[in-house]
Amino acid sequence: MKHIISVPDIHCEGCVKRINTALSDAKLNFTVSLDDRTVTVDGCEHCLKTATDLIYDLGFTPEVK
């Protein structure tokens, strides 16, 4: 199942890189869109919670759509 997380405070490629690194280290299946300011996570509810928590821990404000 695909879950979309809105991250309105993604502003640059540096933000994308930080999120990519954290979610890759957690072995999640995801994509980050700078244009849409979203992270799409493919997986279960646990994967969504893990991704949301990691993004929050990086200092962003994730909002599950």
Image: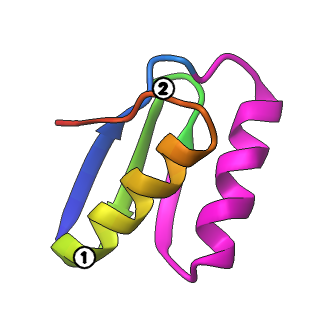
| Image position of 28 (left or right of 15) | left
Q: Earlier in the sequence, mark 1 or mark 2?
A: 2
Mark 2: amino acid: Arg
State the residue position of label 2: 37
Residue 56 point in image, percent of width and height: 48, 42
| Image position of 36 (left or right of 2) | right
Cα gap from disc 1 to disc 2, whole angstroms: 22 Å
Mark 1: amino acid: His
Depicted 1 relative to depicted 51: above or below: below
Residue at image position (20%, 78%) is: 44
Q: Quadrant of the N terminus?
A: bottom left
State the residue position of label 1: 46
Q: Nearer the viewer, mark 1 or mark 2?
A: 1
Please tell me how crowded label 2 is: few (under 14), some (14-19), or many (20+) other residues with Cα within 10 Å. Answer: some
Looking at the picture, tell me which residue is in the foreground, 22 or 34. Answer: 22
Q: Is residue 24 magenta?
A: yes
Residue at image position (67%, 16%) is: 11
Residue at image position (74%, 61%) is: 21
Depicted 2 relative to depicted 40: above or below: below
Residue 28 point in image, percent of width and height: 49, 76
Depicted 7 relative to depicted 1: above or below: above
**Quadrant in the rendering for residue 36:** top left
Residue 64 point in image, percent of width and height: 22, 40
- Numbered disc total: 2
Q: Quadrant of the C terminus?
A: top left
| Image position of 29 (left or right of 25) | left
Read off the magenta span.
Answer: 10-31
Q: Is residue 14 magenta?
A: yes
Q: How is the image coloured?
A: rainbow
Identify the element where label 2 is drawn.
loop
Looking at the picture, tell me which residue is in the foreground, 33 or 58. Answer: 58
